Protein backbone atom coordinates (compact mmCIF):
# COMPACT_ATOMS: atom_id res chain seq x y z
CA UNK A 1 0.00 0.00 0.00
CA UNK A 2 2.75 2.43 0.99
CA UNK A 3 4.76 1.50 -2.09
CA UNK A 4 1.76 2.11 -4.35
CA UNK A 5 1.14 5.51 -2.80
CA UNK A 6 4.81 6.50 -3.11
CA UNK A 7 4.83 5.52 -6.79
CA UNK A 8 1.67 7.52 -7.41
CA UNK A 9 3.12 10.53 -5.61
CA UNK A 10 6.36 10.18 -7.62
CA UNK A 11 4.34 10.52 -10.82
CA UNK A 12 2.49 13.50 -9.32
CA UNK A 13 5.74 15.29 -8.37
CA UNK A 14 7.20 14.57 -11.80
CA UNK A 15 4.13 16.01 -13.52
CA UNK A 16 3.92 18.99 -11.19
CA UNK A 17 7.55 19.81 -11.94
CA UNK A 18 6.77 19.64 -15.65
CA UNK A 19 3.98 22.18 -15.15
CA UNK A 20 6.29 24.70 -13.52
CA UNK A 21 9.13 24.14 -15.97
CA UNK A 22 6.86 25.29 -18.78
CA UNK A 23 5.00 28.60 -19.16
CA UNK A 24 1.67 26.77 -18.97
CA UNK A 25 1.17 26.95 -15.20
CA UNK A 26 2.07 30.63 -15.07
CA UNK A 27 -0.11 31.60 -18.04
CA UNK A 28 -3.14 29.69 -16.74
CA UNK A 29 -2.66 31.17 -13.26
CA UNK A 30 -2.35 34.69 -14.65
CA UNK A 31 -5.45 34.36 -16.84
CA UNK A 32 -7.53 32.83 -14.05
CA UNK A 33 -6.53 35.55 -11.56
CA UNK A 34 -6.96 38.34 -14.12
CA UNK A 35 -10.49 37.32 -15.08
CA UNK A 36 -11.70 36.66 -11.55
CA UNK A 37 -9.83 39.64 -10.12
CA UNK A 38 -11.64 41.88 -12.58
CA UNK A 39 -15.00 40.34 -11.66
CA UNK A 40 -14.27 40.75 -7.95
CA UNK A 41 -13.25 44.40 -8.37
CA UNK A 42 -16.27 45.16 -10.54
CA UNK A 43 -18.60 43.51 -8.02
CA UNK A 44 -17.06 45.39 -5.13
CA UNK A 45 -17.21 48.77 -6.85
CA UNK A 46 -20.72 48.44 -8.25
CA UNK A 47 -22.66 46.60 -5.55
CA UNK A 48 -20.50 47.48 -2.52
CA UNK A 49 -21.84 44.29 -0.96
CA UNK A 50 -19.54 41.90 0.91
CA UNK A 51 -20.53 38.73 -0.90
CA UNK A 52 -18.48 36.31 -3.01
CA UNK A 53 -21.30 34.30 -4.57
CA UNK A 54 -21.11 36.05 -7.93
CA UNK A 55 -17.32 35.76 -8.00
CA UNK A 56 -17.38 32.06 -7.14
CA UNK A 57 -20.08 31.42 -9.75
CA UNK A 58 -17.90 33.05 -12.39
CA UNK A 59 -14.89 31.04 -11.21
CA UNK A 60 -16.93 27.94 -11.99
CA UNK A 61 -17.61 29.22 -15.51
CA UNK A 62 -13.92 30.02 -16.00
CA UNK A 63 -13.05 26.39 -15.24
CA UNK A 64 -14.76 25.25 -18.44
CA UNK A 65 -12.02 27.07 -20.38
CA UNK A 66 -9.09 26.69 -17.97
CA UNK A 67 -9.30 22.97 -17.14
CA UNK A 68 -8.88 21.69 -20.74
CA UNK A 69 -5.71 23.78 -21.02
CA UNK A 70 -4.34 22.32 -17.78
CA UNK A 71 -5.09 18.72 -18.67
CA UNK A 72 -4.77 18.46 -22.45
CA UNK A 73 -1.10 17.50 -22.29
CA UNK A 74 -1.00 15.11 -19.32
CA UNK A 75 -1.48 11.92 -21.35
CA UNK A 76 -1.62 13.16 -24.95
CA UNK A 77 1.90 14.61 -24.84
CA UNK A 78 3.38 11.41 -23.42
CA UNK A 79 1.76 9.47 -26.24
CA UNK A 80 2.89 11.92 -28.92
CA UNK A 81 6.51 11.87 -27.76
CA UNK A 82 6.51 8.10 -27.26
CA UNK A 83 7.49 8.41 -23.59
CA UNK A 84 4.26 6.68 -22.60
CA UNK A 85 5.88 3.39 -23.64
CA UNK A 86 8.58 3.92 -21.02
CA UNK A 87 5.98 4.58 -18.33
CA UNK A 88 3.79 1.66 -19.36
CA UNK A 89 6.73 -0.76 -19.27
CA UNK A 90 7.96 0.54 -15.91
CA UNK A 91 6.98 -1.08 -12.59
CA UNK A 92 3.99 1.24 -12.38
CA UNK A 93 0.35 0.37 -12.84
CA UNK A 94 -1.78 2.34 -15.27
CA UNK A 95 -3.92 3.52 -12.36
CA UNK A 96 -0.84 4.91 -10.58
CA UNK A 97 0.21 6.80 -13.71
CA UNK A 98 -3.23 8.28 -14.39
CA UNK A 99 -3.98 9.16 -10.75
CA UNK A 100 -0.50 10.63 -10.28
CA UNK A 101 -0.96 12.92 -13.26
CA UNK A 102 -4.44 13.83 -12.05
CA UNK A 103 -3.12 14.69 -8.57
CA UNK A 104 -0.51 17.00 -10.08
CA UNK A 105 -3.21 18.94 -11.94
CA UNK A 106 -5.36 18.98 -8.79
CA UNK A 107 -2.52 20.36 -6.64
CA UNK A 108 -1.84 23.07 -9.21
CA UNK A 109 -5.52 23.97 -9.34
CA UNK A 110 -5.73 24.10 -5.53
CA UNK A 111 -2.72 26.45 -5.45
CA UNK A 112 -4.32 28.73 -8.04
CA UNK A 113 -7.58 28.73 -6.09
CA UNK A 114 -5.70 29.48 -2.86
CA UNK A 115 -4.30 32.66 -4.43
CA UNK A 116 -7.85 34.03 -4.59
CA UNK A 117 -7.98 33.77 -0.80
CA UNK A 118 -7.16 37.47 -0.80
CA UNK A 119 -10.76 38.19 -1.82
CA UNK A 120 -12.31 37.14 1.53
CA UNK A 121 -9.55 39.01 3.37
CA UNK A 122 -10.44 42.21 1.51
CA UNK A 123 -14.12 41.73 2.27
CA UNK A 124 -13.41 41.17 5.97
CA UNK A 125 -11.29 44.31 6.10
CA UNK A 126 -13.94 46.57 4.59
CA UNK A 127 -17.18 44.78 5.38
CA UNK A 128 -18.91 42.03 7.31
CA UNK A 129 -19.30 39.05 4.97
CA UNK A 130 -20.93 35.79 6.02
CA UNK A 131 -18.20 33.27 6.75
CA UNK A 132 -20.02 29.98 6.03
CA UNK A 133 -21.26 30.77 2.48
CA UNK A 134 -17.73 31.79 1.50
CA UNK A 135 -16.19 28.66 3.01
CA UNK A 136 -18.70 26.28 1.46
CA UNK A 137 -18.61 28.24 -1.79
CA UNK A 138 -14.88 27.64 -2.08
CA UNK A 139 -15.41 23.98 -1.21
CA UNK A 140 -17.95 23.70 -4.01
CA UNK A 141 -15.62 25.29 -6.55
CA UNK A 142 -12.78 23.01 -5.39
CA UNK A 143 -14.94 19.89 -5.79
CA UNK A 144 -16.24 21.08 -9.14
CA UNK A 145 -12.69 21.72 -10.33
CA UNK A 146 -11.58 18.28 -9.11
CA UNK A 147 -14.37 16.63 -11.11
CA UNK A 148 -13.61 18.76 -14.18
CA UNK A 149 -9.92 17.84 -14.01
CA UNK A 150 -10.86 14.14 -14.12
CA UNK A 151 -12.92 14.84 -17.26
CA UNK A 152 -9.92 16.65 -18.76
CA UNK A 153 -7.58 13.75 -17.98
CA UNK A 154 -10.01 11.38 -19.69
CA UNK A 155 -10.11 13.65 -22.75
CA UNK A 156 -6.30 13.64 -22.82
CA UNK A 157 -6.31 9.83 -22.87
CA UNK A 158 -8.26 9.76 -26.12
CA UNK A 159 -5.68 11.26 -28.45
CA UNK A 160 -2.00 12.05 -28.93
CA UNK A 161 -2.93 15.59 -29.99
CA UNK A 162 -3.12 18.24 -27.29
CA UNK A 163 -5.45 20.33 -29.45
CA UNK A 164 -7.89 17.45 -29.93
CA UNK A 165 -7.72 16.63 -26.20
CA UNK A 166 -8.39 20.25 -25.32
CA UNK A 167 -11.36 20.56 -27.68
CA UNK A 168 -12.87 17.26 -26.51
CA UNK A 169 -12.36 18.26 -22.88
CA UNK A 170 -14.06 21.61 -23.45
CA UNK A 171 -16.96 19.90 -25.23
CA UNK A 172 -17.48 17.42 -22.41
CA UNK A 173 -17.35 20.10 -19.72
CA UNK A 174 -19.75 22.36 -21.60
CA UNK A 175 -22.14 19.44 -22.03
CA UNK A 176 -22.08 18.72 -18.29
CA UNK A 177 -22.73 22.42 -17.65
CA UNK A 178 -25.78 22.77 -19.89
CA UNK A 179 -27.13 19.21 -19.84
CA UNK A 180 -30.12 20.15 -17.71
CA UNK A 181 -31.36 22.61 -20.35
CA UNK A 182 -32.92 19.68 -22.16
CA UNK A 183 -34.77 18.74 -18.97
CA UNK A 184 -37.02 21.78 -19.36
CA UNK A 185 -38.64 20.12 -22.37
CA UNK A 186 -38.95 16.70 -20.79
CA UNK A 187 -40.96 15.10 -18.02
CA UNK A 188 -40.66 12.18 -15.66
CA UNK A 189 -37.52 10.12 -15.13
CA UNK A 190 -35.62 11.53 -18.10
CA UNK A 191 -35.94 15.09 -16.80
CA UNK A 192 -34.89 14.05 -13.29
CA UNK A 193 -31.81 12.22 -14.58
CA UNK A 194 -30.68 15.17 -16.69
CA UNK A 195 -31.11 17.56 -13.78
CA UNK A 196 -29.12 15.27 -11.50
CA UNK A 197 -26.28 15.17 -14.06
CA UNK A 198 -26.01 18.96 -14.15
CA UNK A 199 -22.86 20.14 -12.39
CA UNK A 200 -24.36 23.61 -12.04
CA UNK A 201 -27.39 22.51 -10.02
CA UNK A 202 -25.17 20.72 -7.51
CA UNK A 203 -23.15 23.90 -6.96
CA UNK A 204 -26.02 26.10 -5.81
CA UNK A 205 -26.31 24.86 -2.22
CA UNK A 206 -22.57 25.32 -1.60
CA UNK A 207 -22.94 29.00 -2.43
CA UNK A 208 -25.76 29.28 0.10
CA UNK A 209 -23.62 27.91 2.93
CA UNK A 210 -25.05 24.39 2.81
CA UNK A 211 -22.93 21.24 2.56
CA UNK A 212 -25.12 18.46 1.21
CA UNK A 213 -23.47 15.03 1.22
CA UNK A 214 -25.38 14.22 -1.98
CA UNK A 215 -23.67 17.06 -3.84
CA UNK A 216 -20.26 16.08 -2.46
CA UNK A 217 -20.85 12.47 -3.50
CA UNK A 218 -21.92 13.59 -6.98
CA UNK A 219 -18.67 15.46 -7.67
CA UNK A 220 -16.54 12.67 -6.20
CA UNK A 221 -18.42 10.06 -8.22
CA UNK A 222 -18.12 12.10 -11.41
CA UNK A 223 -14.37 12.38 -10.91
CA UNK A 224 -14.06 8.65 -10.15
CA UNK A 225 -16.00 7.64 -13.27
CA UNK A 226 -13.88 9.72 -15.64
CA UNK A 227 -10.61 8.65 -14.02
CA UNK A 228 -11.75 5.03 -14.33
CA UNK A 229 -12.50 5.62 -18.01
CA UNK A 230 -9.08 7.23 -18.49
CA UNK A 231 -7.39 4.20 -16.90
CA UNK A 232 -9.33 1.86 -19.18
CA UNK A 233 -8.38 3.87 -22.26
CA UNK A 234 -4.68 3.79 -21.39
CA UNK A 235 -4.88 0.07 -20.56
CA UNK A 236 -6.54 -0.58 -23.90
CA UNK A 237 -3.66 1.16 -25.65
CA UNK A 238 -1.12 -0.66 -23.50
CA UNK A 239 -2.26 -4.09 -24.69
CA UNK A 240 -3.14 -3.14 -28.27
Image: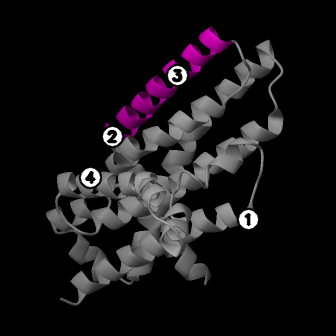
Nearest to the observer: residue 203 or residue 111: 203
The answer to which of marks 4 and 1 sits earlier in the sequence is 4
124 and 107: which one is in front?
A: 124
Of badges 3 and 4, nearer the viewer stands: 3
Precedes in sequence: disc 3 or disc 1: 3
User: Can you identify the residue that label 2 sits on?
Assistant: 24
Q: Which residue is mark 4?
A: 166
Element marked by disc 2: helix
Q: Which residues are magenta?
A: 22-47
Checking the image for residue 33, the label placed there is none
Q: Based on the displayed image, in which of its 4 quarters is residue 28 positioned?
A: top left
Residue 11 visible in the current orientation? no
Badge 3: how crowded within 10 Å, few (<14), some, or many (20+)?
some
Q: Position of residue 240 (x, y in %)?
A: 18, 88
Counting residues from the start of the chain, the first of labels 2 and 1 encountered is 2
Query: Which residue position is annotated with label 3?
Result: 39
Amino acid sequence: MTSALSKTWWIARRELGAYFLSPLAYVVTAVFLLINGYIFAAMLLTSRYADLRLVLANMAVTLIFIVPVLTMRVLAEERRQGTDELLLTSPLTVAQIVIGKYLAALVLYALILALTGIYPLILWKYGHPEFMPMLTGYLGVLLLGAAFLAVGVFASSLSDSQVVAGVVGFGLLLTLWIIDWAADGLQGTAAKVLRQLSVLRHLGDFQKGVIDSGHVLFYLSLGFVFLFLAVRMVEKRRWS
